Amino acid sequence: MSENNVILRVDNLVMHFPIYRGVIRRQVGAVHAVDGVSFDIKRGETLGLVGESGCGKSTTGRTILQLYKPTAGHVYFNDVDLTTLHREEIRRMRRNMQMIFQDPYASLNPRMTINDIIGEGLIVHHVAKGAEVNKRVAELLGLVKLNPAFANRYPHEFSGGQRQRVGIARALALQPSLIVCDEPISALDVSIQAQVVNLLEELQEKFNLTYLFIAHDLSMVRHISDRVAVMYLGIIVELAEREELYSHPMHPYTQALLSAIPVPDPSAAKQHKIVLEGDVPSPVNPPSGCRFRTRCPLAKSICAEKRPEFREVAPGHFAACHMI
């Protein structure tokens, strides 16, 4: 694919949250939530972003959409650097970039009807008004397989899966080209998860959508993603095509993650489970050199001294490890 087919390019993105103490609110440190992340997403593809809880996945998604102002780095959407735009310019750009939030119970305003929730963006961006809004909301509810007659109900009258469909309809309302899916199925019952993922795939095919799909369910990521990036403690340690990553993981952390995927048949031949020692270090004081070295079975002295370069170790396969 050509370079001009890239819809989103993230270049050395950094997001630190300051820690203040005392009466005069003096800064005493920072949470290194995202610490130099780079990747790109091509138009119409799905990039899966996986990793343990607290590794910075959701912060990456929110910082890309400028819900957080990044500490450093650049985010290029259709070759426009979002980090240099003013508030009003960002607001106009948000028509093309939307987000599906993780918690369908917290992301919908309980005081608003479904019609108001989905139609709010249409009114704010002057896309429609009056009866046009109601008509568009009915169309969107039909797209996500909800009864349009539900438009005047409130969020508490819906199940978790139905609420998430409302969240998807809201994200689609302004006909965006990029949607950040922030663990959209993790709060749902297993029986509903597959329905929501299949719906996302159908909508992607119908509207040529581009997804950044954030999740910690590796089997679901394998199902929906074209490429997969693995994140650990604020950095990306490996990035490759889906089948390449699952068949030939190169980074020790990716190998440990994939070895933990449960298999349906306990008697089936399976690779040895890699059990990582210790806990994930604090993002307030991350390890020197390689972030993963404190839990890595292959760690050597160079891992503490020098941060490994994120480089192409095979065609289209990137990893950050001194031992590869």
Image (spheres, rainbow, N blue to C red):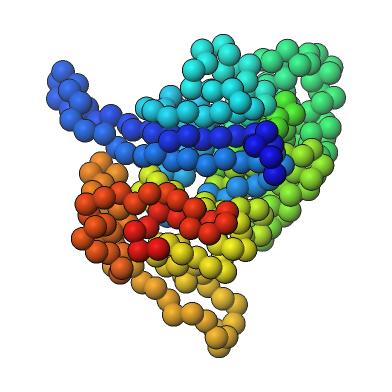
Please tell me how many numbered marks the rendered image carries: 0
Q: Is residue 116 visible?
A: no
Q: Is residue 37 above or below residue 267?
A: above
Q: Position of residue 6 (x, y in %)?
A: 64, 36
Q: Is residue 176 left or right of residue 67?
A: right
Q: Is residue 17 above or below residue 314?
A: above
Q: Position of residue 112 (x, y in %)?
A: 64, 25
Q: Is residue 313 visible?
A: yes
Q: Position of residue 220 (x, y in %)?
A: 61, 59
**Quarter of image, res 224:** bottom right
**Quarter of image, res 153:** top right
Which residue occupies the foreground of this view, 5 or 53? 5
Which residue occupies the foreground of this view, 247 or 91? 247
Q: Is residue 302 left or right of residue 200?
A: left
* Quadrant of the image containing the C terminus: bottom left
Give the residue at x 68% y 58%: 194
Give the residue at x 21% y 33%: 29
**Quarter of image, res 234:** top left
Q: Hey, which residue is sitting farthest bottom in the picture?
A: 267
* Quadrant of the image containing the N terminus: top right
Give the residue at x 64% y 27%: 78
Which residue occupies the foreground of this view, 315 or 141? 315
Give the residue at x 57% y 40%: 40
